[in-house]
Image: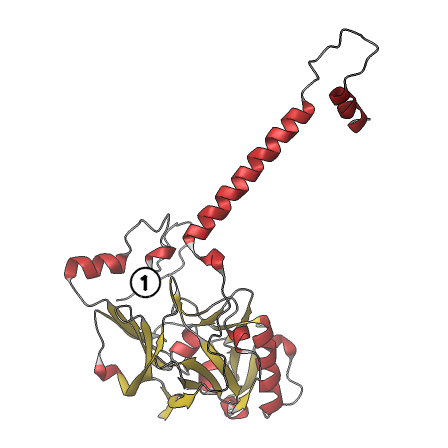
Amino acid sequence: MQSESFFMPQINWQGILGLAYKTLAKPSSSVETFFDSLVEQQKIPNIFSMQMCGAGLPTTGIGTNGGSLVMGGIEPSLYSGDIWYTPITEEWYYQVEVLKFEVGGLNLNLDCTEYNSDKAIVDSGTTLLRLPEKVFNALVEGIIATSLIENFNNEFWTGLQLACWEKTAEPWAYFPDLSIYLRDVNASESFRLTIKPQLYIQSVITSRDDLNCYRFGISPSSNALVIGATVMEGFYVIFDREEKRVGFAVSKCAEVNGVAVSEISGPFSTQHISSNCIASNPFREPIMWIISYALMTFCGIVLLVLVVLLLLPNRRHSSDPEVVNDESSLVRHRWK
């Protein structure tokens, strides 16, 4: 599969194949999704998996990215070691439960609900690792505290500026590993995804011939933690819809100069972590949206009726012109 000029101007088609659940289908969830249709018509297992390659390669340019998408199964030749599974907590996006973050082996020490505010999802369509503001700020502080670089420009962390080094330098050695803990299918255990700096300090092609430049592959988010391509390039990821779980294994293409840039380890006890790190949000459910819209519509109609009644001229006429009707008096006094 190949593509050119991915974001073509003045066309309505995005060129993105959505593989999430039908809850997110447009214009409504009644539309059968591509993958649901494929499972139904071709009788394949309700599972797909992907390998995203590109670790250590420039984020722009021709021929810098590749990978594999397997519909209906798992391809053992694309990964090494065991597959670790985390439950899909809600079937809309591929929502999972993040328990902990570490920078250079040091816990960020945030309440686990901060990592799942208002959701934590696995999404190959998102380029970066996106973190809620509070988590992002804590992570950047942790990287600054553990890196070997002094007085780093703040605009690098916000994505407004690149960081450049001489061609002979290896800047990845200056930065710490990052680790994400996910709840295991055995709820009393967790496992750890670790990415090396080669995955989040990302090479960028520029016009400079004398320098190698890099961007920060992590950004703040206002509404979700998104495990995007920054992390997924280190792993072979299995979306097992049949068993309602997402699996991770070390990708065989996650190497830079022959060195692996990702690791998985576990299991770890969740004894000192909350049994539920996901804050409930009833307005995610479509039925709750319908009820809320109905209530707002009803309230709007009632308000409109009251306004109309208030503005209607008083049609009562007393036989005695000197006697003022009580209701009319109230209206008059209100509008004085």
Q: Nearer the viewer, residue 259 or 116?
A: 116
Q: Quadrant of residue 300?
A: top right
The x, y position of residue 14, in whole percent, is 38, 56
Residue under the image location 40 percent in, 84 percent down: 188
Q: Nearer the viewer, residue 61 or 93?
A: 93
The x, y position of residue 171, in whole percent, is 52, 89
Q: Is residue 202 visible?
A: no
Taking 162 as reference, is 252 left or right?
A: left
Identify residue for label 1: 19
Q: Measured along the vertical axis of the image, is residue 74 above or below residue 197?
A: above
Q: Quadrant of the C terminus?
A: top right
In the displayed orientation, state which residue is furthest to the top. 319
Residue under the image location 53 percent in, 64 percent down: 223
Q: Nearer the viewer, residue 56 or 108?
A: 108
Query: Which coloring applies here?
Result: secondary structure
Taking 5 as reference, is 222 left or right?
A: right
Residue under the image location 38 percent in, 77 percent down: 232
The x, y position of residue 74, in whole percent, is 23, 76
Q: Is residue 42 visible?
A: yes
The x, y position of residue 24, in whole percent, is 38, 56
Name the kind of residue labelled 1 in the image.
Leu
Q: Quadrant of the N terminus?
A: bottom left
**Within 10 angstroms of label 1, few (less than 14), some, or many (20 or more) residues?**
some
Residue under the image location 42 percent in, 51 percent down: 287
Q: Nearer the viewer, residue 316 or 88?
A: 316
Helix, strand or loop for disc 1: loop
Q: Quadrant of residue 181?
A: bottom left
